[in-house]
Image (cartoon, rainbow, N blue to C red):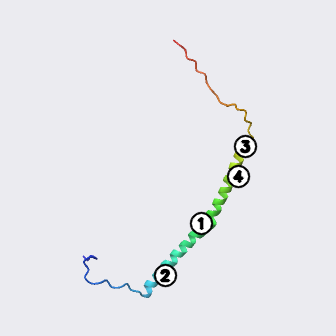
Amino acid sequence: MEYVVFRSRPTPPRSSGFLTLLVRLLALAAAGIAMLAIVLVGLFVVLPVLFVGGAALYFYLRRQMRRAQSRPQDDIIDAEYTIVERRDP
């Protein structure tokens, strides 16, 4: 076994051949394409969905508020109740 701590000779430098350079360029290009795809999906799919959802929520809440304000407010609580009589045996 060879540990980094016990090495007596220096490690050889990495090869900088054409294949290594090509692999690095392909990895960089793949990362760039992935980032571009993420940005485009966010810009053209997620952002419009957020805008439409926000507008729909705004109009829905506005309609609910108008409906609540148009109800007559006569300070009467509309509820059902039951009277329980206590009988002594």
Q: Residues within 10 Å of mark 3 (few under 14, many from 20)?
A: few
Q: How far apart are marks 1 and 2 (CA)?
A: 26 Å
Q: Distance between the residues labelled 3 and 1?
A: 36 Å
- Residue that numbered label 3 is attached to: 67
How many callouts does the rendering have? 4
Element at label 4:
helix
Q: Residue at x 72, y 47 (%)?
A: 63
**Residue 38 x, y percent position in the rendering:** 56, 69
- Residue that numbered label 1 is attached to: 42
* Mark 3 or mark 2: whose residue is earlier in sequence: 2
Disc 3 marks which amino acid?
Arg
Which of the image's four quarters has the N terminus? bottom left
- The circle on residue 5 is none
Disc 4 marks which amino acid?
Phe
- Residue that numbered label 4 is attached to: 59
Q: How crowded is mark 2: few (under 14 residues within 10 Å), some or many (20 or more)?
A: few
Disc 1 marks which amino acid?
Gly
In this rendering, would 13 be left or right of 56? Answer: left
Q: Distance between the residues labelled 3 and 2?
A: 62 Å
- The circle on residue 25 is 2
Element at label 1:
helix
Q: How far apart are marks 3 and 4 (CA)?
A: 12 Å
In this view, 52 is above or below 82:
below
In this rendering, would 32 be left or right of 4? Answer: right
